[in-house]
Image (cartoon, rainbow, N blue to C red):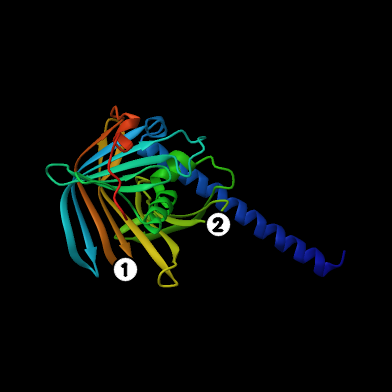
Amino acid sequence: MTRRTFALSLAGGAVTLRASDKLAQGREVIDKTIEALGGDRFRNLRSRTETGRASSFYHDRLSGFSVARFYTKYLPADGPEKIHQVQKQVFGKKQDDAVLFTASEGYEVTFRGAKPLLQDRVDQFREGTLHEIFYILNRRINEPGMQFKSHGVDVVENQRVEVIEIYDSENRNVTAWLNANTFLPVKTRYYHWDETIKERREDVTHYTKYREVNGLMWPHETARDRDTDKLFQLFADKVTINDSLADSFFELPNGVTFLKP
């Protein structure tokens, strides 16, 4: 071995060591986040119900506002489903308008019947779930190929944060900013390809107003942006966990009328 190849070997080993250190540091920070969220209480989370007000936006202008209830139930992480979560979003004071996402399908449900959601909206919900920080930490944490890489400390939204980049085996990538003192998620970002406009788009989610809920810390305000434009906000007045939500609650009623998309 020449001096030059020996020096290159040492340099390559140092790079590998630094990369390994960043992965170890990233996992250490993520473990602190799980503990901050509630430890075993968070790991064993089965369901949550968020009640409050939801706002939607179009081109940064308010386009919808409603009383809302979001019911989320986690499925076994080793199940065959595409995602291990189902969700029912109920809107209006009379709770007579709902959007239902099963593990593979989506429907808009009203008194008229059930209308299948377009596939791109179902896919968007699925990808959004797979990129969500709480879903990753609760259901995907031990998934083969999942890695957490530390990028050190920064300041975001007037908070000192730990910056963590998350990768999975299918090349999904999420950047998470975690409060450096509490280790609670402050903000996440991921990119996705929009087949309609043939461009890459940026999705950012902000988490604020954490409160304790039966031993868990959960954000009561969530805001989503797309390409810097406001997309959605949820202001939760109440959050409960591990409610007895039957499987049938996340299924279409027997004899429901199917409407055309």
Q: Position of residue 165 (x, y in %)?
A: 49, 56
* Label 1 packing within 10 angstroms: few (<14), some (14-19), many (20+): few
- Residue at the image position 71 percent from the left and 57 percent from the top: 13
Pointer 1 and pointer 2: residues touching (CB < 8 Å)? no
* Label 2 packing within 10 angstroms: few (<14), some (14-19), many (20+): few
Closer-to-camera residue (63/15): 63
Query: Helix or strand or loop: what does disc 1 sit on?
Result: loop
Residue type, numbered disc 2: Asn
- Left or right: residue 12 versus residue 115 is right
Give the labeled residue for mark 2: 171
- Residue at the image position 51 percent from the left and 45 percent from the top: 27
User: In the image, is residue 103 above or below residue 43?
Assistant: below
Whole-Å distance between the Cαs marked 1 and 2?
24 Å
Closer-to-camera residue (129/5): 129
Which image quadrant is residue 223 in?
Answer: bottom left
**Residue that sits furthest to the left in the current view:** 93
- Left or right: residue 246 versus residue 24 is left
User: In the image, is residue 219 above or below residue 1?
Assistant: above
Query: Helix or strand or loop: what does disc 2 sit on?
Result: loop
Q: Position of residue 78 (x, y in %)?
A: 52, 35
Mark 1 or mark 2, earlier in chain:
2
Give the labeled residue for mark 1: 228
Q: Position of residue 124 (x, y in %)?
A: 39, 56
Residue type, numbered disc 1: Thr
- Left or right: residue 2 versus residue 55 is right
Q: Position of residue 135 (x, y in %)?
A: 41, 44
Closer-to-camera residue (254/228): 254
- Residue at the image position 23 percent from the left and 68 percent from the top: 60
**Residue that sits furthest to the right in the current view:** 1
